[in-house]
Image: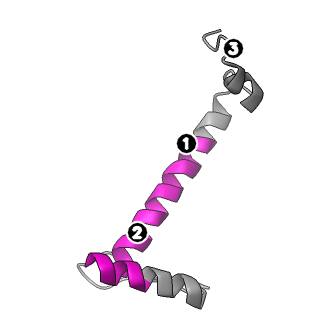
Amino acid sequence: MLYVYSASGEYPMLAIRLPEEIEQRLADLAAKTGRSKSFYAREAILEHLEDAYLGAERLKTPAKRWTQEELEAGLDLDD
């Protein structure tokens, strides 16, 4: 379930339900580093969005792709 709230003059607030294990890991990380859980949630979302955006752009403009075997064999990849 996902909720988005907006308070005047602030960023919109997003509320999400997390499995207890993930929430505890997030809380532990925040406590150890002195950063907020929101900071880490925001960073994770931004990283995922960037990856998804780049993937979608790559699909729009197909280019040469190499297999894992080609990369490992060190074939001339400049073609």
Q: Nearer the viewer, mark 3 or mark 2?
A: 3
The location of residue 35, given as percent across then percent down, is 28, 76
The circle drawn on residue 75 is 3
Location of the N terminus (image quadrant): bottom right
N-term-proximal mark, 3 vs 1: 1
Residue at (53%, 58%) from the top-left corner? 48
Q: Which of marks 3 and 1 is in front?
A: 3
Few, some or many C-alpha atoms within 10 Å of disc 2 (few <14, some 14-19, many ≥20)? few
Vertical side of 60 occupied by 16: above or below? below
Residue at (49%, 50%) from the top-left corner? 50
Magenta range: 27-55
Few, some or many C-alpha atoms within 10 Å of disc 1 (few <14, some 14-19, many ≥20)? few
Residue at (67%, 36%) from the top-left corner? 59
Q: Are marks 1 and 2 in contact (CB under 8 Å)?
A: no
The circle drawn on residue 42 is 2
As helix, strand or loop, the secondary structure at mark 2 comes to: helix
- Spatial CA distance of label 3 from label 1 is 25 Å
The location of residue 51, given as percent across then percent down, is 54, 49
Is 30 contained in the magenta span?
Answer: yes
Asked if residue 35 can be seen in this view, the reply is: no
Q: Which amino acid does label 2 sit on?
A: Arg
User: Which residue is tagged 1?
Assistant: 54
Vertical side of 47 occupied by 6: above or below? below
